[in-house]
Image (tube, helix red, strand yellow):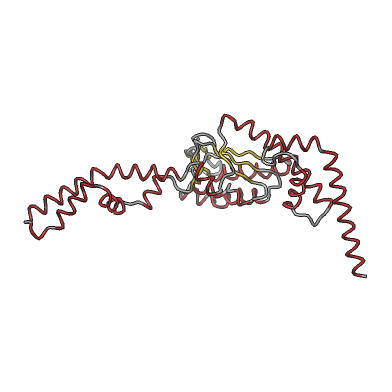
């Protein structure tokens, strides 16, 4: 992608500038557009589906001068104020890294936001190569080599008996150790990178609670169809319950519906069918909640007389 900055008509010395923009990266203009779109969807009363495949924010001096931090923060503000369901999905072979994870993390708006991922996707602040560069540097790799490799252990044992050796023999052993270390370095680095990559897979993300579920791409359309349909219907009933009793919290209203539901609460399709089949019972429950709330208010006023 290229950003074209036109020449200033009033400045004869200015020239048109064409700035390349890498893919999977949020720049100031794309961050502003994203935040603006989220706010527009909120006014429309629509749920949002975000296919997150970003490696981070641009961090060059030009983008810092272009207020990348301000426009990135606008995405957070827009999601924090969002009043409808927001679903973040990491597609197959997609990845969510760095600051781009920060601006769509479900903890921004836990009541509305949830994250899902395809089993072949990856997520984490640093990429595996970056983690090994920071947490498993060459001195750490050498320590592990000398702890695990039998040949290095043998050479270390020989080197400990240096009192009985001449300088040439010691130098030969040290050269053998250095050669062995040089041979093993790529192997240990690759193993460490693979180990770090395991922490970015959906199994680990699910274990840490940062995603709700691993959803394969092949069944994602069906899964999100029923998930969104159920959530929209549920939110509508929750709003009616909270309108009937303004003391009710969202969690308390959901618990009322959950207590009435005879189907498996975790099965979206079954819950949708329950809402449709038990509409009259739910309406009656809302009326009883409203009546109980009014009676409670009257009792409170009478107690104050």
**Front-lying residue, 260 or 23:** 260
Regarding residue 12, the answer to whether it shows in the image is no
**Front-lying residue, 87 or 20:** 87
Residue 159 placement, left or right of 267: left
The spot of residue 71 in percent (x, y) is: 58, 49
Residue located at (80% from left, 51% from top): 242
Q: Quadrant of residue 52?
A: top right
Residue 196 placement, left or right of 271: left
Q: How many marks?
A: 0
Residue 171 placement, left or right of 284: left
Q: Quadrant of residue 211?
A: top right
Q: In what quadrant of the picture does the C terminus appear?
A: bottom right
Residue that lies at the very extreme toward the front in this rendered image? 262
Residue located at (59% from left, 44% from top): 212
Residue 273 placement, left or right of 6: right
Residue located at (52% from left, 49% from top): 99
Regarding residue 125, the answer to whether it shows in the image is yes
The spot of residue 208 in percent (x, y) is: 53, 49
**Front-lying residue, 82 or 225:** 225
The spot of residue 271 in percent (x, y) is: 73, 38
Residue that lies at the very extreme toward the bottom in this rendered image? 305
């Amino acid at each position: 992608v290229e950003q074209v900055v036109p020449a200033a008509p009033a400045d004869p010395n200015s020239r048109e500038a064409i700035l390349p923009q890498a893919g999977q990266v949020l720049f100031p203009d794309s961050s502003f557009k994203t935040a603006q779109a989220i706010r527009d969807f909120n006014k429309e009363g629509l749920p949002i589906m975000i296919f997150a495949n970003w490696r981070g924010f641009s961090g060059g001096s030009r983008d810092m001068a272009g207020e990348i931090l301000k426009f990135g923060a606008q995405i957070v503000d827009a999601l924090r104020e969002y009043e409808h369901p927001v679903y973040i999905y990491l597609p197959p072979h997609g990845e969510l890294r760095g600051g781009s994870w920060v601006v769509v993390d479900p903890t921004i708006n836990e009541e509305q936001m949830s994250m899902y991922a395809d089993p072949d996707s990856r997520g984490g602040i640093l990429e595996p190569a970056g983690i090994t560069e920071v947490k498993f540097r060459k001195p750490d790799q050498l320590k592990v080599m000398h702890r695990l490799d039998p040949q290095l252990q043998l050479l270390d044992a020989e080197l400990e008996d240096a009192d009985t050796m001449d300088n040439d023999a010691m130098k030969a052993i040290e050269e053998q150790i250095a050669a062995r270390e040089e041979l093993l370095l790529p192997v240990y680095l690759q193993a460490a990178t693979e180990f770090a990559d395991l922490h970015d897979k959906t199994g680990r993300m699910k274990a840490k609670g940062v995603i709700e579920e691993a959803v394969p791409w092949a069944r994602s359309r069906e899964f999100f169809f029923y998930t969104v349909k159920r959530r929209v219907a549920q939110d509508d009933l929750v709003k009616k319950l909270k309108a009937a009793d303004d003391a009710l919290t969202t969690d308390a209203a959901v618990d009322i519906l959950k207590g009435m539901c005879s189907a498996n609460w975790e099965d979206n399709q079954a819950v949708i069918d329950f809402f449709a089949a038990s509409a009259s019972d739910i309406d009656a429950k809302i009326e009883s909640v409203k009546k109980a709330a009014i009676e409670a208010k009257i009792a409170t006023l009478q107690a104050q007389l």
